[in-house]
Image (cartoon, rainbow, N blue to C red):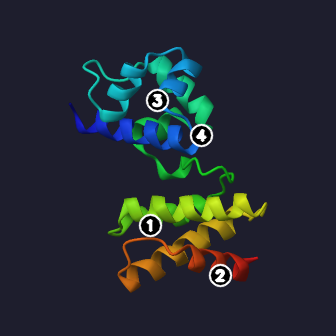
Amino acid sequence: MTDINKDIGERIKIIRTRLGLTQTELGDLLGVEKASISKYEAGDAKRGVPVEFLVKIAELGKCSVDWLINGSLIEVPVGIGKTKATAEIMQSLSQSRIDLGMIKQVIEVAMEHLQSNNLEMAPDKFAELIEVLYEEISESGAEQVNKGTVARLIKLAM
């Protein structure tokens, strides 16, 4: 197993979980066995992930194949659109020492709050919100995102 296969697998899992699908459901949608999806997500596919699958999952997840393969932060599939400002903020975050798991958690909690409250936020404001939330959580030493803090900062940003 190579690191790139593991990285691709993690990004496939991100898309699948954001879509709220099980491995079986994703397999059914894309015409792939659940066992293959499991191997792709674990980075255990002996021959890697087929290009045809990457194209299909990118389409389904509304991201680029480049993001799936390289993890380019310009194409983060957060469902809010992409702007130069978003890309620049995410790129600056990627160049510092950050906890990517925490960033993912911050994005997921913020998106969940926006969606559950039928709120929309401009992509550049969303990127700034994620940066502020991450900094606040990092400085506090918390290991989990506080949903109340997210709600409060979103309310202030609106």
In the displayed structure image, the side of residue 107 where residue 49 appears, left or right:
left
The picture places residue 32, in percent across and down from the top left corner, at: 47, 16
Q: Quadrant of residue 132?
A: bottom right
Judge depth for marks 3 and 2 and give the one in front.
3
Near mark 4 (Cα within 10 A), the count class, few <14, some 14-19 or many ≥20, is few
Q: Which residue is tagged 3? A: 23
The residue that appears at 74% across and 64% down in the rendered structure is 122
The picture places residue 67, in percent across and down from the top left corner, at: 48, 41
Q: Earlier in the sequence, mark 4 or mark 2?
A: 4
Q: Which mark is residue 152?
A: 2
Give the amino acid type for the residue marked by disc 4 in the picture.
Leu
In the displayed structure image, the side of residue 24 where residue 86 appears, left or right:
right
Quadrant of the snapshot with the C terminus:
bottom right
Circle 3 SS class: helix
Circle 2 SS class: helix
Mark-to-mark CA distance, 3 and 2: 35 Å
Q: Are marks 4 and 2 in contact (CB under 8 Å)?
A: no
Give the amino acid type for the residue marked by disc 1 in the picture.
Leu
